[in-house]
Amino acid sequence: MASTTMDEPPQAVLHSLVNADGSATYSAPNHGYKIVAGVNYPVEVPYRSDEIPESTFIEVNLRPHNGVSMVKERHVEELIKRTLATIILADESPRTMLQITLQVVSVETDESLPGGIKGGGQAFNAAVLGCLDAAVPMRTVAGAVLVGIGSNRHFMVSPGVVARKRCASLHVFGFDRDGKILLMESEGKFGMDDWKEAEQVARLAVLGSSHKTNAANVNKQNGDVAMNGSDTGGSPAICVLDVVRKAMEDRVIKDEAWRQES
């Protein structure tokens, strides 16, 4: 029997840096990764060979919690770059560069981010929030989440380090606000049925109750999908895109506060 849990929602704050065009701090659930994104846009392309005449050149730099960037960081940088390219209106500012720097400021243990795909979803969410704060033109808003499949087909949303060690497989899914899949990465041992159910669980965690009908089929045997540690009779689950909307609302309220004071 499949079951799903997510202990707590992530946290997001916009404009956490002063000297960047846009910035955001994204804290994963379960006291996991905390990532600060700094975005500069538009900036001049440093090397003429990287300049794209009809589009914007996207540069992503991921800096781990300790040490220097290795191959695993480069892998995540490329995933974020390719995924952002599908939602950014790059033709709005040709011959310029969108520069995104992602700094991991804290991790759950002394583990460096990310090994394989573990931190790809959190890093992508931080990059999207930073782009929103920098007013980068985008087709849509998107979010991503990590789903782990444990014993007895127990689906865990944003599992911590201890929980990940018990998972047979890990999956990162990214969706835009219309439900289109933008990012799919998996590692471990799993079947096609497990992958499909993990995709539905991730869809619910990212998009929320508006897409809950399909995701509910994951646990149709017991009629219950609990994404925030409560049953379906409680308060609705807080999804990733809800966190993005709330961060944007808080930023607008803060920017407009001077109107209330004057």
Image (cartoon, helix red, strand yellow):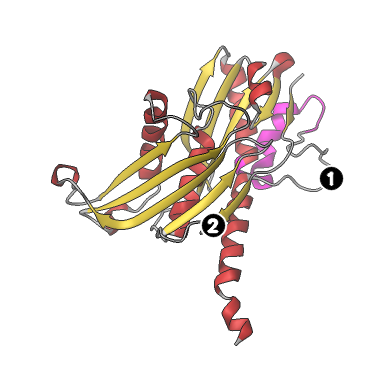
Q: Amino acid at mark 1?
A: Gly
Residue toward you, 244 or 64: 64
As drawn, the residue found furthest toward the right would be 233
Q: Circle 2 is placed at which residue position?
A: 14
Q: Residue furthest left?
A: 48
Q: Which mark is residue 196?
A: none
Locate residue 258, reporting x and y percent. Answer: 57, 80
Q: Is residue 55 left or right of residue 126?
A: left
Quadrant assignment for the C terminus: bottom right
In screen coordinates, is 204 left or right of 68? right
Q: Are marks 2 and 1 in contact (CB under 8 Å)?
A: no
Residue at x 41%, y 53% (from the top left corner): 139
The foreground one among 38 and 171 is 38
Q: Is residue 225 magenta?
A: no
Label 1 packing within 10 angstroms: few (<14), some (14-19), many (20+): few
Residue under circle 1?
A: 234
Residue drawn 74% across and 22% down?
2
Percent coordinates x, y for residue 159 in the rendering: 66, 28
> Please, what secondary structure does the residue beneath circle 1 have?
loop
Query: What element does badge 2 sit on?
Result: strand
Q: Answer with mark 2 or mark 1, whichever residue precedes in sequence.
A: 2
Instruction: Give the percent coordinates (x, y) of residue 21.
Output: 40, 60
Q: Main secondary structure of the magenta part?
A: helix
Magenta residues span 206-224
Which quadrant, please, contains the N terminus? top right
